[in-house]
Amino acid sequence: MSAEVLHLVVEAANEGDRLDRYVADHVPDLSRTYAQRLIEAAQVLLNNRQARPSTPVHAGDTVTVHLPAPQPVGLVAEPLPLQIVYEDRDVVVIDKPASMVVHPAPGHDRGTLVNALIARYPEMAINGDMRPGIVHRLDRDTSGLLVAARNERALRSLQAQQQARTMLKIYLAVVEGRMPELEGVIDAPIARHPTDRVRMAVVAGGRPARTHWRVLEDLGEYTLIEARLETGRTHQIRVHCASRNRPILGDPLYGPKRPRATFGLTRQFLHAHRLGFKLPSGGEWVEFTSPLPADLEAALARLRQSARAAVRRVSS
């Protein structure tokens, strides 16, 4: 991969953000620490000038980010703790915590899920790249279930299921606002945003993308939904919900700017809840479920409390 240059325009919602926080929030899988390093190395320019990590940004500012080409280093095995839901000789299903990056990227060459997997399963280094065994990924701040292959045969089987759209992937999410119906399908193509290369967007001529959704709970100004992916595009649920003016609560990239402590959240309310597929050996269908992690459960409790309080105010 070669070096990449990103040109970002600060929106009003990010008025006053620190430069390092803005860059970390708007460049996928980039840590704040690495963003600070890039800024200090003059690889991030604010209005074409060098700035400090703490410099506030303002609406209309231009931020230019020079991402250096990844260095050709080998994967490093790290014995990090993993929550294993299922494993056999072919596959492993992991319940990924929020804040863990799936595979190495600029600023995240260590501490990723891949680093942990190859430490536990050395045979997984099968692709000759930085994503051995990875069939699908979750964003850094999305928690939940993910399956990885332990050998080439299993990898081909899982990839074929994903391409045939037979793999079951269901997420739980809280969106801002009320959904217009109790269930529906968002069928809208997704591609890179035409002017903001960091984001994805609904774009005519993009790759086909379908998300099935249904309402689980009315939370007043918010809604708890279940979203089933028919396709697996980058940021698909986040982009599709935002395209219907129902962004995921707490989403720093596609949602409106809110205090990071909204309902106690420090990330988007998105969790990979159910995962199903056929085992590569024998073809048996298996399904796994991951409950909401503690931070999302706590946020949901606050949302319910807020909704009840709003009803009491209206009725009093």
Image: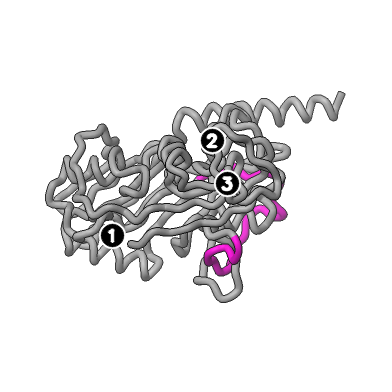
- Crowding at label 2, few (<14), some or many (≥20) Cα neighbours within 10 Å? some
Q: Please state the total of marks drawn on the protein image.
A: 3
Label 2: element kind: loop
Identity of the residue drawn at 54% across and 72% down: 206
Residue 268 within the magenta-colored segment of the rendering: no
Q: How far apart are labels 1 and 3 at the CA level?
A: 53 Å
Label 3: element kind: strand
- Where residue 191 sits in the image (x, y, percent)? 53, 66
Residue for badge 2: 52
Which numbered disc, 1 or 3, marks the residue that appears first in the sequence? 3
Identify which amino acid the numbered label 3 is placed on.
Arg
Identify which amino acid the numbered label 2 is placed on.
Arg
- Where residue 143 sits in the image (x, y, percent)? 42, 41
Quadrant (top left, top right, bottom left, bottom right) of the C terminus: top right
Identity of the residue drawn at 46% across and 37% down: 36
Identity of the residue drawn at 62% across and 60% down: 184
Identify which amino acid the numbered label 1 is placed on.
Lys
Q: Specify the farthest residue to the bottom.
A: 205
Q: Is residue 36 visible?
A: yes
State which region is magenta.
172-195
- Where residue 254 sits in the image (x, y, percent)? 60, 50
Residue for badge 3: 49
Q: Specify the farthest residue to the front.
A: 49
Quadrant (top left, top right, bottom left, bottom right) of the N terminus: bottom left
Q: Report whether 64 appears left or right of 78.
A: right
Residue 290 found in image quarter: top left
Q: Nearer the viewer, residue 89 or 248?
A: 248
Which numbered disc, 1 or 2, marks the residue that appears first in the sequence? 2
Residue for badge 1: 278
